[in-house]
Structures are given as structure tokens and as C-alpha cells.
Amino acid sequence: MRERARVPLALLVPAGLGLAFLVLPLAGLLVRAPWGLPQRLAEPGVLTALRLSLQTSTIATLFCVVLGVPLAWLLARVPFPGRRLVRALVTVPLVLPPVVGGVALLLVFGRRGLLGSWLDSTFGVTLPFTTTGVVLAEAFVAMPFLVIAVEGALRGADARYEEAAATLGAGRWTTFTHVTLPLVAPGVAAGAVLCWARALGEFGATITFAGNFPGRTQTMPLAVYLALETDLEAAIVLSLILLVVSVTILAALRDKWITSA
């Protein structure tokens, strides 16, 4: 039996401190959770924010799947000039401060924006400070997670199945729906779950583009921010919900995103 290598103390100490730094704040949420947690969850304000968050994040995820899967396929399967630039632009929301993303959405979809003015004058459609605006803000920051996951799955899939389908006379659409999608279905599912989780936790772009109106645009992260000033226990309850969702998603995807020891 091979003897386990000794861990240098110079690495063990900072590693332990780093773990404590990440875990202690989460433990603080659990320790400070109110005793009447079920009753707090049933309060109208909490339920309203929870319901709105679930609805908007789900719709945003569906929107991202409809647009993001074809975009990922384009980046993975079709060589074209400027593909690296397009891929970089797709991933910009990952590193862009969410508040800046909200400002960018206002400049495009606001009443005086590039598209917003046309939508308002032609169809009477106003997107900022509406529930639809929440969906757009969440989709903007969450879609890169889906695109990256699906593109990675497409690059890892065996292209010979698609080539065989084309040889047998299947068209590109038939090959995509009957061969490609089943091959990368786990990657699409994983990307959709990560996309949904990111949309659920979105704050900066939402409050900038959609505002913070209870029952209309106040999602759970916004409710947490507001509750910190008036009701600490409500803020803890909402934070616990988001924590449980995040941990559940990471645990469900651990085999795909975390290399096993």
C-alpha cells in the first residue's frame, strides 16, 4: 500500500484558511436562520418574490435555450471569419459588471434606446421596469453559461454519427434534431440548469433595467437587498432559499463539472 504523501504545512494552512473564508459566511446563514422558518416562507412578500423569481428565471432559460443552442452549434460546427471574435462577444456578460449590462440594456431597449424607441412608437411596447424586462436582464447575463456548456458538448461529441446521417441522405435539420441533439442532450441539460441558476440569482442588471417593484420586478435577490434594511429575518430566509438552490445544482452537476479524485 502506497504511503500517503505528507502535505506541506505551508500549503495546508492557507488552504484551510481559504476553505474557512468560503464556508463560514454560508454557515452564518444557517446559524442565524429564524426558528419560525416555515412561517416566514409562507409570508406574502417572500412567496411573491419566490414565485416571480421562479417564473422569470424559467422563461429566461427557455429563451436562452431557443437562441443559445443554435448559437453554440454555429460556434462549434461552422467555421467562419471572425468566429473567435463572436465567441469572445458571447462570453463578455460573464465578466461584465451586471450593472453595466443593465445600462447597456437600457441604451438598447429603453424608450429612447436603439430598438426600444422603435418598439414604443410602432407597437407601444415598453420593456424597462416590467416583468419582461426582468426576463431580458436575466437572459442577458445567463445565456453565456448555456452557450459555453453546449459548445463544449458539441466539440466533445463524435461527429462521425452526423457524417453517417448525412451519408444516408438526412438533411441538416434532420441530422441536428435526430442525431446532434440526442448526442449533446446531457450538455444542453447541464447548461440549462446553470443558466437557470444564474438567472435566479441575477441582481445588478435586473435592478438597473427593470427596477425593484414588488410583485412585478422584485425577484428574490432584490427582495434580499430591500429586506436587509427593514427585516433581517426575511433577508436570511430568502438568502437560504438561494443557497439551497445553488448547493443542489452544484451537487447535481458535480460529476460533469468537478473532476473526481
Image (cartoon, grey):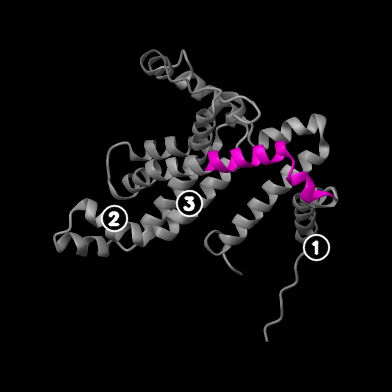
Q: Residue 131 carries which label?
A: none
Residue drawn at x 48%, y 18% is 110
Q: Which of marks 3 and 1 is in front?
A: 3
How many badges with numbers are in the image?
A: 3
* Residue located 41% across and 56% down the image: 153
Tell whether position 46 is magenta. Answer: yes
The type of residue carrying mark 1 is Leu
Separation (CA) of disc 3 from disc 1: 38 Å
Element marked by disc 1: helix
CA gap, disc 2 and disc 1: 54 Å
State which region is magenta: 36-57
The answer to whether residue 160 is above or below residue 234 is: below
Circle 2 sits on which residue? 177
Residue holding disc 3: 191
| Residue that mark 1 sits on | 9
**Mark 3: which amino acid?**
Gly
Residue toward you, 70 or 14: 70
Most foreground residue, 72 or 238: 238
Q: Earlier in the sequence, mark 3 or mark 1?
A: 1
Residue 161: image location, x then y, percent:
26, 64
